[in-house]
Image (tube, rainbow, N blue to C red):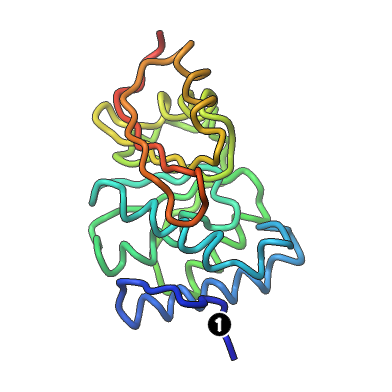
Amino acid sequence: MSDGRGNLELDVSRETLERLMVFSEVLKKWNPKINLVSRKSIDDLWTRHILDSIQVFEAAPEGGAWLDIGSGGGLPGIIVAILAAEKSPDTQITLMESDLRKCAFLRNAARECGVSVTVKSKRIESAPEENCDVLSARALADLDDLLGFAERHLAENGTAMFPKGANWKKEVDNARKRWRFECDEITSVTEPGAVILKIKGVERV
């Protein structure tokens, strides 16, 4: 029976691949109860969600403190933790999510996958500053709002990793009205026209 990965080739150990497969099963089990990802995308879980999260990890700086905000379905947060366990074991991963049910899912998924994360049930805009080295967010808000969260939680020399869809250029142009920032656009391997925005030096105009 197909595991849903199709022809996907991942440069990971067997243990990491097994953890990714465990995560996919946990997500499918919880999704009908609390709608972690859209039902129409669940059949394409590996490409739409897991591989999309893997490329965020692969493009990010290694090590340090990683904060994933609006973690919800563990994308990319739990995927980052799974990959970091093999490739960057010193990375400390914190998942921030205000929905208590989703926090319960995140803790359960981390336990089932055998990875270490800290789950904080807090609102991003009012939580104490994290001073993290890497900040990630997927499908959470537009770039203008995300940069506000980055200003609050990112260390001075930290890096923000924001996957964005085909309208990313419009979001960048709009954000530059209020923010100064360095931005590298990394072409997505999972969605035509999409990118990962790798951002540093966030300051208000």
Instruction: Tell me if residue 171 comes above or below residue 140 in the rendering.
Output: above
Residue 91, position as x, y percentages in the image:
28, 54
Choose between 168 and 64: the one closer to the eye. 168
Q: What residue occupies the far right of the structure in this picture?
A: 33
- For the N terminus, the image quarter is bottom right
Task: Look at 56% across and 60% down and name the residue there.
Answer: 48
- For the C terminus, the image quarter is top left
Instruction: Tell me if residue 121 comes above or below residue 37 in the rendering.
Output: above
Q: What residue occupies the far bottom of the structure in this picture?
A: 1
Task: Look at 60% across and 52% down and name the residue there.
Answer: 72
Task: Look at 23% across and 51% down and name the residue there.
Answer: 62
Instruction: Tell me if residue 105 comes above or below residue 128 in the rendering.
Output: below
Task: Look at 48% across and 56% down and name the residue there.
Answer: 190
- Secondary structure at numbered mark 1: loop
- How many circles with numbers are drawn on the protein? 1
Label 1 amino acid? Asp
Residue 170, position as x, y percentages in the image:
54, 25
Residue 13, position as x, y percentages in the image:
30, 78
**Residue at image mark 1:** 3
Left or right, residue 35 beside residue 173? right
Q: State which quadrant residue 162 falls in.
A: top left
Choose between 146 and 39: the one closer to the eye. 39
Choose between 15 and 126: the one closer to the eye. 15
Residue 97, position as x, y percentages in the image:
57, 46
Choose between 173 and 58: the one closer to the eye. 173
Q: What residue occupies the far top of the structure in this picture?
A: 205
Instruction: Tell me if residue 125 comes above or below residue 203 in the rendering.
Output: below
Disc 1 crowd rating (10 Å Cα; few below 14, some 14-19, many 20+) is: few
